[in-house]
Amino acid sequence: MNPTVDHGNTAADTSLGAVTPLREFLATTGSLTTEERRLIVDQALLLIEQFYVHLPLKRAMHAVDPVQRLKLLRHRLDTMPEERRFHDEMISIFTSLRDLHTRYLLPAPFDSTTANLPLRIEEFFEDGERRYLVTEVTPGVIDDPHFERGVVITHWNGVPIDRAVELNSDRQPGSNPAARHARGVDTITARDMWVSAPPDEDWVILNYVATDGRKREVRLEWLVSTPDLSPTAVDANSAEDPFSQALGIDIQTERIRRARKLLFAPEAMELERQVTAIFEARGGLRPGEAVPDPGKANVSTFPDKLEFRTVDTAHGEFGYIRIRSFHVGYRDVDGFVAEVARIVRLLPQNGLIVDVRGNGGGTIMAGERLLQLFTPKRVEPERLHFINTPLTVDLSMSQPSLEVWRQSVTQAVETGAAFSDGFPFSREEPENCNRLGQRYHGPVALIIDGLCYSTTDIFAAGWQDHAISPILGTQEGTGAGGANVWTHELLGQYLLGPDSPIRPLPKGSAMRVAIRRSTRVGPRSGEPLEDLGVKPDEIHRMTRNDLLNDNEDLILRAAGILAGVQPVRALSVEVDRTSEREVSLSTTTENIPRLDAYVDGRPRLTLDLEDGQTTFDLQLDSPGPHTLELRGLEGKELVAARRIDV
């Protein structure tokens, strides 16, 4: 006997206020004139030919010619009356680059909107096969009592769901097959309409297996929402924000993350507003301070970015921190790093899991400066390189912040070099990446997936290049976005004047471009991140239990990695400045047989240690502030460090 198939429909009233059915939203969209479209195409040609740092790589790796396609599109504009067709072709040209940094962004009203189905689908593996589970459902929207969290999707509009995901993956600009598949799953129920075309269908018919084992069917409408920006996000178009030059972000993943928070976790949005209001009332955030509310002891000062808890596993009790985004402005980067330092001190010191899955990136410094907290080694930031063209020469000449690149970009006129020399974001950045030093001395493990992109790629690469710990992945690698992204509008603010080639775009349309590529340091020095990404040391395939029970099996796997790291080390210190020229230090150590003490980089003292407490004095050369550094060694190996300003 065949199982019964039931049908359900989306409720007409979503009761979500800010959400509109797709068909109603599309009725409000405007249109571009032929001249406006021509301007967009001309500016896209300029952006790709003069600023796009990966153009030689993409032509070689993906056999694409975006310049010729844009020229053909310009030639055919007069015979292309349909607005949708123009946007589709622009999106297709940029997508062919397989670069989530370099995007054509649709005009208003698409620029602030996301189309979502009222559910989220994630993949898991069972008996060696990939399956798709509903992990979140928007309350009060779906008029089908059987459609709930935990049902398994089998078909999408009559197409087997795995094939539907594959077709959607082909429309995604991921740098490699694993990254495209990860985005195919992530975007099958969520479309950021700023960077991708609206869904073709007004509704979707899903076939699913309910939790009672019966096969059923439901029809769901696409809904359009306008999620708020994160309160700590960077204004990518502001020349006044110095970190607008320092972004490494997949805006699609970030905007979908915010839209899902609105649809599936309104209580988290409310918590974010409460924490923001607390600090606004106090005149801002002081680095490293806790939320001044006893009822929020386990809440981060960056609740949109950071979550933390203690996890109890079969291997023991460990700390767990989820970093969902690095998208913080220059006023918040130091506070963000100090907040992570504060959090790791609150968690068990015998092992820490750092989970960056789904993190689309943000401010490059917010990622790179975190690395110092987990290693005794000196952190070396990745290098950034321009492509050498006449307009990147003009750009380097116009901006004092780009002075360090100026000579090599200018010399390329004579040498013919394709790329500039590579440098960190600023001269101060190597010191900024080491100012705090190690703050967690127990073993650590990093978890990544195919949605990790840009700044998160750079963070994972730095983790691997400095040999901090093994990396556990749920896919074969990160999203492989190795670049710094600038907006077309920002370029227009830097290249000013009546002769500037950068012209304002019409009706809110926009573009972004990967302007500086990043290369790795350490053992992989000079290797590009773009298209290659970071490969994990081990892979864990997500299970049904992971999706339904807060990543239980994944955390157990990571805990097993931590439990295998021996010995567990500890280094804490209390400092008392007894006079202008002397300090007294009381250290507590575990599994650190030798300790070297430095004052302002100069060696002062070496001690052989037993586990436990040790007290000693250090002489200072002069009154005033000094930097003390303690380095723990086992044999010749540096195994722990602590940096203190006094």
Image (cartoon, grey):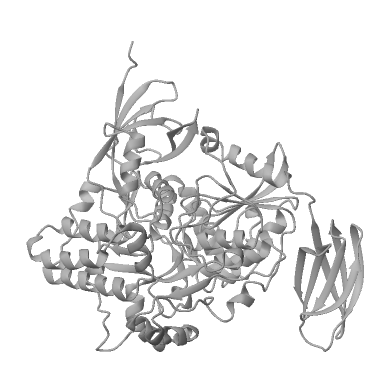
**Where is residue 225 drawn, in percent x and y?**
33, 52
Check the image and name the residue furthest to the front. 415
**Where is residue 295 drawn, in percent x and y?**
64, 53
Q: Quadrant of residue 461?
A: bottom right
Q: Is residue 425 visible?
A: yes
Quarter of the image for the N terminus: give it.
top left
- Count of labels in the image: 0
Question: Relative to residue 616, is residue 570 depicted above or below?
Answer: above
Could you tell whether 352 is left or right of 606 in the image? Answer: left
- Residue at 49% over, 53% down: 478
- Residue at 29% over, 64% down: 104
Near-viewer residue (192 or 180): 180
Question: Relative to residue 537, is residue 533 depicted above or below?
Answer: below
**Where is residue 154 drawn, in percent x and y?**
36, 30
Near-viewer residue (423 or 44): 423
Q: Quadrant of residue 370?
A: bottom right
Q: Is residue 194 visible?
A: no
**Where is residue 136 drawn, in percent x and y?**
44, 40
Near-viewer residue (163 or 3): 163
Check the image and name the residue furthest to the left. 79
- Residue at 47% over, 84% down: 401
Quarter of the image for the C terminus: give it.
bottom right
Near-viewer residue (223 or 350): 350
Q: Quadrant of residue 59?
A: bottom left
